[in-house]
Image (tube, helix red, strand yellow):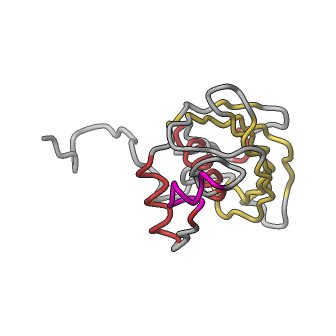
Amino acid sequence: MGRLFGEFSVGQRFVTPARTITEFDIASFSGLTGDYNPVHTDEVFARATAFGGRIAHGPMGIGIAFGLASRLDLIDGTVVALLGVTWDFRAPVRAGDTIRAVIDVTEKRDVKDPKRGLLGLAFTILDQDDRVVQEGTARLLMRRERHPSGSWGAVTEGDEGVQTG
C-alpha cells in the first residue's frame, strides 16, 4: 500500500529501479493508443527523419514513470486522483534504452477535504547514460488515511480465510 499524504515532505527524493524499453513495449503502446505514426512503427521511414530510427512514443514515458513510482510503492492505493501533468520531452527514447525516474516532492498542501491533501511531484527520466530524456510535474490528490479495502499484503492473526498453495 502506498504512502499517505502525511508520509511525504517537500524535498524528499526517490530514485526508481531501472527498466529497459523493448520493441514489444513500443508495439503494445501503438496498439493500445491507436498511434501508428511511422516514426514509431516503420524503421525505413524513421531512418529518414531527424531521429535516425524508430523512437518510443513520448507519452509512453509518462506512463512508465508512474509505473516505476509504483515499484517504490509510493502512491498505490493512496492517490485519489491525478489532477494535472506538465511534461517536456528532451531526447528520444528507443528500444534498448534503460530508463529510471528521479522523483522529487515539490509541493504539499492542505485542501478543503480534511481527508485529503495535494502533493506536487517533479519527475526526471534518465536513460542509461544519465541523460535527461523527459521531465515533468504532476499534481496528485492523496489520502490521509488508508482506504478500508486497501489491505493487500496485510498479515492477520490466525489462519481464518488464508489459503495456501
Nearest the camera: 89 or 146? 89
Where 59 falls versus 23 (above or below)? Answer: below
Nearest the camera: 160 or 47? 47
Q: Which image quarter is the C terminus in?
A: top left
Q: Is residue 47 magenta?
A: yes
Q: Is 57 left, or right, of 102 in this rendering?
A: left
Position of residue 79 measured from the top left corner of the image (x, y, whole percent): 64, 56
Q: Is 46 left, or right, of 43 in this rendering?
A: right
Q: Is 59 left, or right, of 17 in this rendering?
A: right
Nearest the camera: 67 or 40? 40
Nearest the camera: 45 or 99? 45
Q: Which residue is drawn at 78% across and 45% down?
A: 90
Which segment did they paint magenta?
Answer: 39-48
Q: Quadrant of residue 6?
A: top right
Position of residue 54 measured from the top left corner of the image (x, y, whole percent): 57, 52
How many circles with numbers are drawn on the protein? 0
Position of residue 126 measured from the top left corner of the image (x, y, whole percent): 69, 34
Q: Residue at x 72, y 38 (%)?
A: 103
Q: Is residue 76 magenta?
A: no
Q: Which residue is drawn at 80% across and 51% down?
A: 137
